[in-house]
Amino acid sequence: MSELKRTPLFPSHEALNARCVDFGGWEMPVQYDGVVAEHQAVRKSAGVFDISHMGEIMVGGAHAVAFLELTLTNRASTLAVGDAQYSLMCNEQGGVIDDLYVYRIAQEVFLLIVNASQIDDDFSELKRLVVEFEKDRTVNVVNESDDLAAIAVQGPNVNLFIDDVFSLKGLINVDKPTDLTKNQIDVFIFEGMNVYVANTGYTGEAGFELVAPRDVITQLWDRVLDLGKDNGIQPAGLGARDTLRMEMGYPLYGHELNNTVTPLEAGLGYFVDLERPFQGQSKLSSQKNNGLKRKNLGFVMTSKSPPPREGYSVYIGGKQVGTVSSGTQSPSLGKGIGMAFIDMPHALIGKEVEIQIRGRYYPAVLSKKPLYKKYD
Amino acid sequence: MTNIPEELSYTKSHEWVSVNDETAVIGITDHAQSELTDIVYVELPEVGRTLLRGEQCAVVESVKTASDIYAPIEGEVVAVNKDLEAAPEKVNEDPYKTGWFFKIKLSGEPDLSGLLNSSSYSSEIEGV
């Protein structure tokens, strides 16, 4: 087994007595005080996550927009400078190589934030596509994952202190982080370095993702914890990140997504624009025209049950109709929730199903994502 | 600090056993509950089931994972802690008292060989 990689914040996690696990080859904190406490901190006050394992790939050049239009499912051309969108990169069969966030940080420069486990696959695929794409056109793809680190600061109280992290105005559009609208990014100076601050996250709460040179990430982490301490901030691990994203019905690569699942099957059609060519587009178009064979939906357990887990089978009337892709006990709802791939024609919101857990069958209902809504 | 009562016997798989005459009460240790954290479900054996030593007989589920529980001693299940159905968090709060799992009637003389005393269990989990 190869040595696990560590982020520059690893000593901070050790000092906080975090329990660490192997996550896609990285030794990452799964929890500090406990998954539920950290989950509730993010829902009710604030939490800070180390997301330095995630990858940062820069795509720049005079034809960067045209390149991304041909490479990703969502339309990078619609982004103004300082805006961002969720997108996916598919293989020629329409399977997902990765899901990612695309930030337009300058007219001709895009920052792609990608999954830790997919950095190498993404980068080699992008380089391969660059060779195909360039003829008389210019695009550069640079993997900055080793130089950049990142934290996510998430929760309803984050707006109370995030502006105090920085003393100067943003370099792109806004004066301060709380001026950023959803999916907007700017650059702020911290300790003399450029830090990208984006109004994005994977928890369903208000909050920001901060991408910084690895040399200043520990100072940034400490500063956020210090400024947030009167607002209930807690360091939060991957365990809480997982329960938070499941409540929102957000996919996680390796669970809802992989290179044999298409974005349409994953229920991410909103982020796929089939009206122009991109890698995988013809397969996705024909899948759309011919109808899906399965689709990923959320579900909620409707009686007392063990927590649903990945790999459990989904039944209707004694017949298997699907498989759970992610599941947990929702800390916010106090019941089992999850996502599952359900065969057509059964993949309908409101359909009653059963989840098989250790040979017994427990009732659940297929449900619209997000599975948890704060303001119902 | 992990609580390891002196009067109990332990297994390497983090169950505790309290033997009184012909019955034994079984649960999971303070160390185990603290490692699992946030216990949300406990599946207990059927009353009347006969357990062999080392047999998988219960499941404890935290938010993150499901963990198997093994019978530390042989005998018939005569009672289970029904309170855990509605309040599995009792295992976190009080693993040696209100968080007990099940009670078994021993098949014969209690065979405590292979079980650990508190100091051996303490060295077992040290540095874990």
Image (spheres, coloured by chain):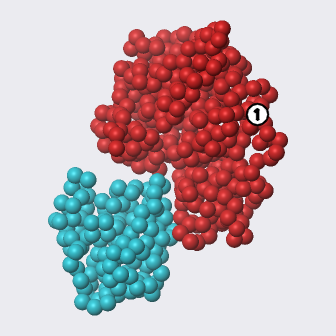
Vertical order, B89 against B17 (above or below): above
Whether residue A221 sits left or right of residue A175 in the image: it is left
Q: Is residue A226 visible?
A: no
Give the residue displayed 76% in from the left and 48% down from the top. Answer: A292
The one nearer the camera, A108 or A282, is A282
Q: Colour of chain B?
A: cyan
Quadrant where the N terminus of chain B is found in the figure: bottom left
Is residue B62 shown above or below A201? below
Number of marks? 1
- The x, y position of residue A198, in whole percent, is 56, 24
- Chain in red (letter): A
Q: Position of residue A297 (x, y in %)?
A: 68, 50
Rendered image quadrant of residue A303? bottom right
- Residue at the spot x=42%, y=63% of the render? B67
Q: Can you name the residue that lies furthest to the right here? A: A289
Q: Position of residue B8 (x, y in %)?
A: 24, 73
Callout 1: few (<14), some (14-19), or many (20+) C-alpha neighbours within 10 Å? some
| Residue at (64, 34) in percent of width and height | A91
Examine the rendered structure and indicate whether residue A36 appears above or below residue B28. Answer: above
User: Toward which corner of the image does residue A80 lie, by quadrant?
Assistant: top right
Report the residue at 17% width, 66% height from top: B120
In the rendered structure, the answer to whether residue B55 lies left or right of residue A107 reads left
Residue bearing mark 1: A282
Q: Chain of mark 1?
A: A
The residue closer to the viewer here, A205 or A88, is A88
